[in-house]
């Protein structure tokens, strides 16, 4: 399975996301992966699943790198 993360390269939402990504020292793809990871943490804390496989996002279990800043 593979995924492609993209963001429409124009408009106010892209400009805001790009500003945040740059301030974090991340590429847009790294920023989107960080958003997914943080969203995963929020949902996991909210719903408390019992499955230990849900401890970390799939892309991290598969070894797709994301840089902690």
Image: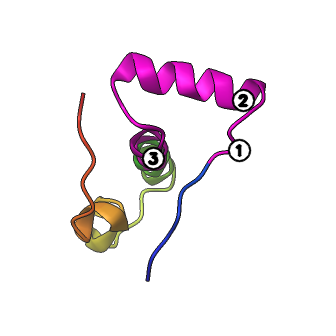
The reply to whether the magenta stretch includes residue 27 is: yes
Asked which secondary structure carries label 3, the reply is: helix
- Classify 3 as above or below 68: below
Tell which of 50 and 66 is nearer to you.
66
| Residue that protrudes farthest toward the front in the picture | 9
The reply to whether the magenta stretch includes residue 17 is: yes
Residue 13: image tag = 2
Q: Classify residue 39 as left or right of residue 69.
A: right
Question: Gap between marks 2 and 1, in whole Å?
Answer: 9 Å
Residue at (76, 24) in percent of width and height: 12
- Classify 3 as above or below 18: below
Residue 65: image tag = none
The part of the image, by quadrant, that contains residue 63 is bottom left
Asked which secondary structure carries label 1, the reply is: loop
What percent of the width, then of the height, locates residue 28?
48, 39
* Circle 1 residue: 8
Asked which secondary structure carries label 2, the reply is: helix
Badge 2, how many Cα within 10 Å: few under 14, some, many 20+? few
* Circle 3 residue: 29
């Amino acid at each position: 399975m593979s995924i492609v993360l993209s963001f429409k390269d124009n408009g106010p939402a892209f400009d805001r996301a790009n500003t945040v990504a740059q301030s974090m020292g991340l590429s847009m793809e790294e920023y989107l992966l960080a958003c997914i990871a943080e969203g995963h943490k929020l949902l996991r804390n909210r719903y408390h699943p019992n499955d230990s496989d849900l401890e970390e996002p799939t892309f991290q279990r598969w070894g797709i790198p994301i840089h902690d800043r």
